[in-house]
Image (tube, rainbow, N blue to C red):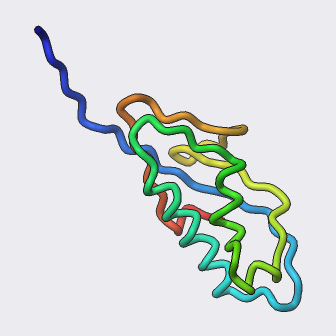
Amino acid sequence: VEIQYWRPIQKSIGIRFELTTNSDYTVDIGEQIKSASADYINQLDIGDRIAINKLYVPAGLYGALDARSYEIESLQLTVDGVPVEGDYTLAFNAVAYCDSDNIE
């Protein structure tokens, strides 16, 4: 029986948000959105699908009062700096990594 191993390939994931904010929105809230979104992506498994609709939950800061200070109009993924339309499925040997600096 032949067994093969592959090292995971790291895919750099970014997100571009378009938000509508009110006067209660602060830079700190923006940082919370970035942190929650990056944490969500970084917990995904190898070969998982990054679903746009699921990103609204961590980015929405649901349950936090700060969530009332903005609305997410749209979001777009980038993979290794290239914009992607819709969801993105990682290859069987690819793992997602998101640094909050890659979230706009």
Task: Determine which quarter of the picture holds residue 10.
Answer: top left
Location of residue 61 in the rendering, given as x and y in whole percent from the top left corner: 67, 73
Residue 70 or 17: which is nearer the viewer?
A: 70
Q: Point out the residue furthest to the left here.
A: 1
Is 98 rendered above or below residue 95?
Answer: below
Q: Indicate left or right for 26 with 70 as reference.
A: left
User: Residue at point 60% right, 64% down?
Assistant: 103
Residue 1 or 37: which is nearer the viewer?
A: 1
Location of residue 18 in the rendering, given as x and y in whole percent from the top left corner: 80, 63
Which quarter of the rendered picture does the C terminus lie within?
bottom right
Which quarter of the rendered picture does the N terminus lie within?
top left
Q: Indicate left or right for 56 with 22 as reference.
A: left
Q: Indicate left or right for 31 with 22 as reference.
A: left
Q: Point out the residue furthest to the front here.
A: 63
User: Residue at point 61% right, 47% down?
Assistant: 78
User: Residue at point 72% right, 38% down?
Assistant: 85
Location of residue 98 in the rendering, given as x and y in whole percent from the top left corner: 48, 58
User: Residue at point 64% right, 72% down?
Assistant: 33
Is 27 rendered above or below residue 46?
Answer: below
Is 12 rendered above or below residue 89?
Answer: below
Residue 66 or 95: which is nearer the viewer?
A: 66
